[in-house]
Amino acid sequence: MLASMKEMVEEAAGRPRAVPAFNVFGYEDAIAVVRAAERLGAPVMLSTNVVALAHMPFAVLAPMLLTIAREASVPVCVHLDHGKDYATVERAIAFGYPSVMFDGSQLPLADNIAETKRIAALARARGVSFEAEIGSVGYSDPSLGLKHEYTDPDEAGRFVAETGVDAVAVSIGTVHRMESQGASIDYDRLAAIEARVGATPLVLHGSTGVKDEDLRRLVRHRFGKINIGTALRMAFGRTLREEMEARPSEFDRIKLFAKPMEAVTAEALRKFEILGWGKE
């Protein structure tokens, strides 16, 4: 069933669990993730970023993901991740996304607040859940030239108060696209942020680089949504390479994708358990 991010994360943020938001790039990983969610009876988010949209445009990707969500037996939210401008967010909403993120984290604070307020007004008018970012979660690839800036707790409080976002992404030591668990979480900073943002649920980006024990600890804080991308890409890619090496005469992509899809489901199940959604 198609669901709202706002309701999902508000419910999760009040309990020792967080909703996983998996970055997906097509049918194979999207359906593999939903299968994991259905096995546990857990809510899930299917997130699409600019990389996915460069490969498969909204007009193709949105109907597919929305159909998967509507036909699922659990709540599924389709979400735009890291929308960089008003036009991209507006297109996602026009194509039926029930949840969007505007990422103004590379902008000066005043500009980030102003543009976030403008786009938040659009989302609210359309009944769409809205996420934004304060501070800036960096990337493991320095050639991208993007800043990495820890979230200032006072700025986080101001940002939430002035923008009225449904959820806020914060930078407390994680890095996007890390392939090993080397992130160091600043728990003192997190506590200060929580003291200033009130009931607004927090969002963690770059979770693949976070140790499992840290993720288990973080879900006991105000995190309602935790993004997961690289871990699934690694599971799919590694298993696909193994399949191609083991079956050099097989050219049917449906057959070659079967085990990688199972690997994605297995990794998603592992993440669900870490985030508090194990079978009760």
Image (cartoon, helix red, strand yellow):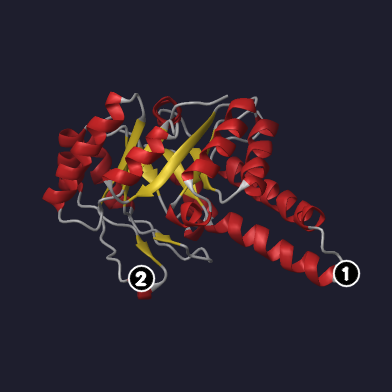
- Is the residue 185 above or below the residue 92 in the image? below
**Which one is earlier in the sequence, the residue at label 1 or at label 2?**
2
Q: Amino acid at mark 1?
A: Ser
Residue extending farthest left: 110
The residue shown at (33%, 38%) is: 90
Secondary structure state at the residue bearing disc 1? loop
In this orientation, which residue lies closer to the viewer: 127 or 17?
127
Q: Quadrant of the C terminus?
A: top right
- Is the residue 62 above or below the residue 82 in the image? above
Other residues around mark 2 within 10 Å, as few (<14) / some (14–19) / many (≥20): few
How many numbered discs sit on the rendered protein?
2
Question: Mark 1 and mark 2: span between their CA atoms?
Answer: 38 Å
The residue shown at (16%, 44%) is: 113
Q: Nearer the viewer's eye, disc 1 or disc 2?
A: 1
With 102 as the anchor, is 33 left or right in this view?
Answer: right
In this orientation, which residue lies closer to the viewer: 145 or 193?
145
- Is the residue 203 above or below the residue 147 in the image? above
- Where is residue 44 shown, x and y percent of the image? 55, 35
Residue where numbered disc 2 is placed: 144
Residue extending farthest front: 59
The residue shown at (63%, 35%) is: 37
- Where is residue 6 shown, x and y percent of the image? 39, 28
Is residue 117 visible in the rendered image? The answer is yes
Q: Where residue 249 is drawn, which disc sits there?
A: 1
Q: Where residue 185 is drawn, which disc sits there?
A: none
Q: Quadrant of the N terminus?
A: top right
The quarter holding residue 69 reads top right
With 117 as the anchor, is 62 left or right in this view?
Answer: right
